[in-house]
Structures are given as C-alpha cells and as structure tokens.
Image (cartoon, grey):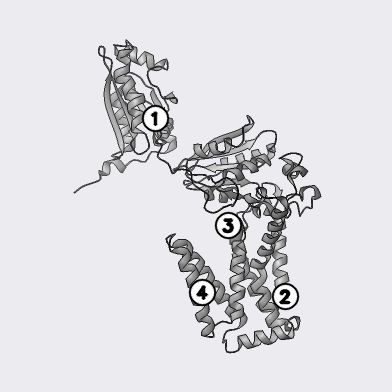
Amino acid sequence: MTFFNDSNFKEYYSESKLKKMKLYNSLDKNITLFKKIFGDNSDLVIRNFSLGRSDIISAAIFYFDNLTSADHIDSNILQPLLNDSYAAGLHTGYEVVKAIRLGNIITRAQIKLSQNVKELIDGLVSGGVLLFIDGLNEIYIITTKVSNYRPLSEAEVENVVRGPRDSFNEVLSINIGLIRKRIHNPNLIFQSTKVGKITKTAVCIGYIKGICSPKLIDKVRSRISKIDTDVVLSDSYIEEFINDKPFSIFPQMRNTERPDVAAAALLEGRVVIIVDNTPVVLIAPGEFCSLMQSAEDYYNRYVFSTLVRILRYFALIIALILPSLYIAIVNFHQELIPTKLLEGIIAARSGVPLPNFAEAFLMEITFEILREAGVRLPRPVGPAVSIVGALVIGQAAVQASIVSPLMVIIVALTGIATFSIPQYNISLPIRVLRFFLMILSSIIGICGLAIGLSFILIHMCSIRSFGTPYLTPLAPFKYNDLKDTIVRSPLNVFKKNNSKIIHNKKTM
C-alpha cells in the first residue's frame, strides 16, 4: 500500500519564496497553489460551495480540522453564507460578496483580508480559516481557533498553604488573562512576536508603563528579536538565548507557574515573558535573592515569613557545603571535633573500606539517582519507590559496612535541605557545585572549601541579569532595598509596590 506521493515533497517553500508569491483572480488557480504548498496533508480540509442563488460565485474554505472549531465554522461562516444571506435578501453572488466586504454576513470577531501568501499561511497554521472567492486576488483569514485546552489547575511545583490555587496552562491568551485578572490598569502592556523560523512560536512580553524601566524593556525586546533559531518549543529555549551569561550554571531569570507571582513581579517593575504552549512564565531580571523567595512569603505575617526565609538560606548553606565540610574536618582537621564525637565517628567508620570522599561521593550519586527515579516514575508510585529505595539502600549499605551511619545522615540531611529551596532552577547549580566542593575539600581540607566558595562568590558577583547585578542589593550593597530580601518587612513599610525596582532603574 502506498501512503506517500513523492511529488508533494520535491519543493521546499522558504519564507522569502512565499513572500514573492502572488495570488490569482481565479479560485481554481488559488486552490491549486495552496494544494501545491501543503501537499497531501490528511488533516487539511477543503470545502467548496457557491454564493448566491443567481449570478453564482464559486467559493471555498481551507482549514486544519485539528486546529479549528467545527462548531464555529458551521455557525459563524457556513450558516451565514449559505442560509442567512438569503434570509437577509441577498440573492445574487455579487450581493453576498459585497456584504462580506462591508463586514456583514460572517459573524466571527476577527476577520482580515490579505494578498500576502506568507501571511495567509501563517493564519492557516495558527488555527484560522481561509475563505477563497472566485474573481478576487485576495483571501479572507477568519479566526476560529479550537478551544479544547487543559483546564486551570493547582500549581504542582510552587505549592502554598495559603494563597490562590490557579496556575498557568499552555494557552497564551489564557495566561495573559490570568494576569489581567489581577492587575486592572491600562498601563499593563502585552506585546507579542513570533520566534522560530519553523515553529513560529508566539512569545509575549508584559510590563507596566511608568513602573518598569524603559531600558529593561528595550533590552528584553532586543534580545528576543535577535534570536536566530528554527525551533522554539518552550520557555527554556528563550531563557537560554537571552541570558547575559549563557555559560553560567546559575539561572539568571526566575520562572513561575503562578499568576499571582507574575503579577507581583510586574508591580515591582519587572518584565514577564510568556511563551505559547508553555505553562511557565519567565521573569526578568532574576536576581539571586528573588530566586530564594516564595509566593507564600506575602500571604503570611511578616515575622513568620522572615523566619522561614532565614531558614531557607540556612538550608541552602547546608545543601551546598555540609558533605564537603564533613570530609574536610574528618580528613584534615580532627582537632576541631570534640573527643566524644570523634570517638563515635571512628567507631562508626571501623570496617568501612572506602575513604570519606569515596563514601560521600557514592552516597550522593545514589541519592541523585533515586531523586531522578522518583521524578520519572508514574506519579502514584514515584514517591513511594524513591522513599523506600532510599531507606532500603541506606540500611543495607550500613549493614554491609560500605558506608557509615553518619554519612547516611549527612547525605539525607543534605537532600532534605535541597528540597527546601523554593525555586527548582536554583537548586540545580547547588547540586552540581556540591560535588565540586567535595573534590576540593578532599584535597586540601577547609582551605579547599574556602577557595571553592570564593570562586563561586566571585562568579556570582560577575553575573548581571539584564543589567542588574546578580547579588543586588547585597553586592552592590543597598540598604533601602534590604526590606524584602533575607527579611520580609511589614507591608506598610513599602510606600509603593514598585519600591523594590528603584535600584533597577539606576543600574540598567
């Protein structure tokens, strides 16, 4: 059985070639042209019909049945053209065509007349219907996008005990609406463009005029417009292309699945980047302190939010240096350990054949494998397998004298501390740098740990996120901006919602 006709795949239509193409006055020639461009697409529907009962004019519609709504096509296009036009007293084909040109008959809100073949194709593949009319070298683009999208659900990654439960989904227009639902201001601007030569993915930037720095807006626009790629499938593509330092392992933009977080970022003077088909929104600039904040910080009393933030930074330090500190002290600085504790460590390590570094490295690798297994497995069994696997493997490793009980405790505490970091993308470099510090600590002890931390700090000081220093307001130090960093001051301390972004206007 033959499924493919090779003649349909001999010619490639580039954007420049499509721009040069001209439409004909003949309906048959225009249909032939579009059939030649699209070939034998099984989901491309062509519907021929006639306009008028006398002086009949031939017409046709083109659409992809999986991108459009059949109900909208029937009720808003075919029904008015084939039935309602006669009830309105339009008997000839010329009268029907004239009524269409005047904006009557077709009841869809978005309808556009175009002679540009590339623009027509973009409209068709974006969920539009093309209306061909014999005798015209112009074609109507009628928007009838399909409305079967994933319903709004609760955020899965950024969970909160108190606060809104809705989250973004994969539809660009709905995501914009979720933000507009929270900010009722005419100065809230959303501007959209297409990125990706093949995918032509819609990318939208949002900001509030009068609050956001014009320099920041221009930087975001300029970097997105300079993206030269064929494919953009998610927000991560955009993030990698527009980062200040693409080779740094630290994230330079915040991402969120919560509309309230995106709205708060806009009110602080930041820019949000929304990518179609992605339930995650990017926020620029993304300084380190903002990556350590959670939406729930603003839904609880400031005292509790401040304590939780301090605890969060403490967990960050534990996740980064605890295994390295253990290796350095046990191997090189035993005099720092109390005698009783040192005796317990020696007794626990008796019979363990591996050195401290190999023991820690093996346990950390095992923990990372279990973590990935828990993510990849089906949701009902994933957490159970990862928890049971960790318990069984840890207990078996201790009984087999492969690792000491203290090392199991340290690795487990390190892993739990990693989960306390609110932003997943900032926990990733911490997991990588942990191994780097373990290697240095195993070579020259605490001096190696100090050298490694110095290199990390110097690198973080060199990073800028869209012109904003990565460690601001800590470096450069800005006292007035400390009220919403490690601590969260009472809301009445903030004179305006956009007070946090004042430093951005000065440093960009």
**Which amino acid lies under the numbered mark 3 shown in the image of this protein?**
Tyr
Secondary structure beneath label 2 = helix
> Which residue lies at the image location 75% right of the left edge and 47% below the top edge?
490
Task: Please state if 292 lies on the left or on the right of 424 as rendered.
Answer: right
How far is disc 4 from disc 1 in space, using C-alphas? 66 Å
Seen as rendered, the residue at the extreme left is 1
The image quadrant that residue 22 belongs to is: top left
Disc 3 crowd rating (10 Å Cα; few below 14, some 14-19, many 20+) is some
- Above or below, 275 relative to 118: below
Residue receiving disc 1: 21
How far is disc 2 from disc 1 in space, using C-alphas? 69 Å
Disc 1 crowd rating (10 Å Cα; few below 14, some 14-19, many 20+) is few
- Above or below, 422 relative to 14: below
**Which amino acid lies under the numbered mark 1 shown in the image of this protein?**
Met
Residue receiving disc 4: 391
Residue 328 image offset from top left, x and y in percent: 69, 78
> Which residue lies at the image location 71% right of the left edge and 40% below the top edge?
498
Among numbered discs 1 and 3, the one appearing first in the sequence: 1
Q: Nearer the viewer, mark 2 or mark 1?
A: 2
Q: Nearer the viewer, mark 4 or mark 1?
A: 4
Among numbered discs 4 and 1, the one appearing first in the sequence: 1
